[in-house]
Image (spheres, helix red, strand yellow):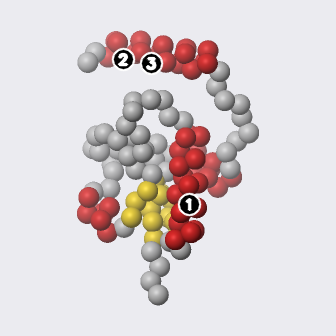
Amino acid sequence: GDVAARLLSADSVQAYKGPSVGANKPSAGDRAAVRHELLDLWDDGGVRTAADWHVAAVAALRDCVECGDVPVVAGGTMMYVQWLVRGKPDVSEPTEVAVGQAEALISEFRGRAGP
């Protein structure tokens, strides 16, 4: 019988809901023709990491296996693909201090950029 394929986006920008122009997201027609995963995952404005994407990607892969679909990983963030193929690196989580410093820098940048 027929085998269904699923495209799993490994693009860090496409994982966010919002403007599609700069992200080069697939069109509605493309999405209707072939099932796409890992697009528009987050819209809460929070900070997301490669580890967050990795959790979602592994879940999507498991679902493909369970359904008998063939996963096709495509996209522009090679670090994401490396994590998927080689596994998540054994590194510690960022400290609250480091996260706070990064968020402060981001807020400062946003303040300079204007609305």
At label 1, which amino acid type do we have?
A: Leu
Q: Is residue 10 above or below residue 72?
A: above
Cα separation, mark 1 vs mark 2, equals: 36 Å
Dot 1 crowding, Cα within 10 Å, few <14, some 14–19, many 20+ = many
Rendered-image quadrant of the C terminus: top left
Question: At x 49% / y 51%, what residue is drawn?
Answer: 10
Label 1 close to label 2 by CB (< 8 Å): no
Element under disc 2: helix
**Which residue is tagged 3?**
106
Q: Is residue 72 above or below residue 58?
A: below
Whether residue 77 can be seen here: yes
Element under disc 3: helix
Residue 84 in percent (x, y) is at: 61, 52
Side (left or right) of 29 relative to 13? left
Question: At x 56% / y 55%, what residue is drawn?
Answer: 59
Question: At x 47% / y 79%, what residue is drawn?
Answer: 3
Cα separation, mark 3 vs mark 2, equals: 6 Å
The disc, 1 or 2, on the residue closer to the chain's N-terminal end is 1
Residue 58 in percent (x, y) is at: 58, 54
Residue that sits furthest to the right in the current view: 90
Dot 3 crowding, Cα within 10 Å, few <14, some 14–19, many 20+ = few
* Numbered label attached to residue 110: 2
At label 2, which amino acid type do we have?
A: Arg
**Which residue is tagged 1?**
61
Label 3 close to label 2 by CB (< 8 Å): yes
Residue 6 in percent (x, y) is at: 45, 66
Question: At x 55% / y 16%, what residue is drawn?
Answer: 100
Dot 2 crowding, Cα within 10 Å, few <14, some 14–19, many 20+ = few
Whether residue 76 can be seen here: no
Q: Is residue 41 above or below residue 95?
A: below
Q: Is residue 60 above or below residue 100?
A: below
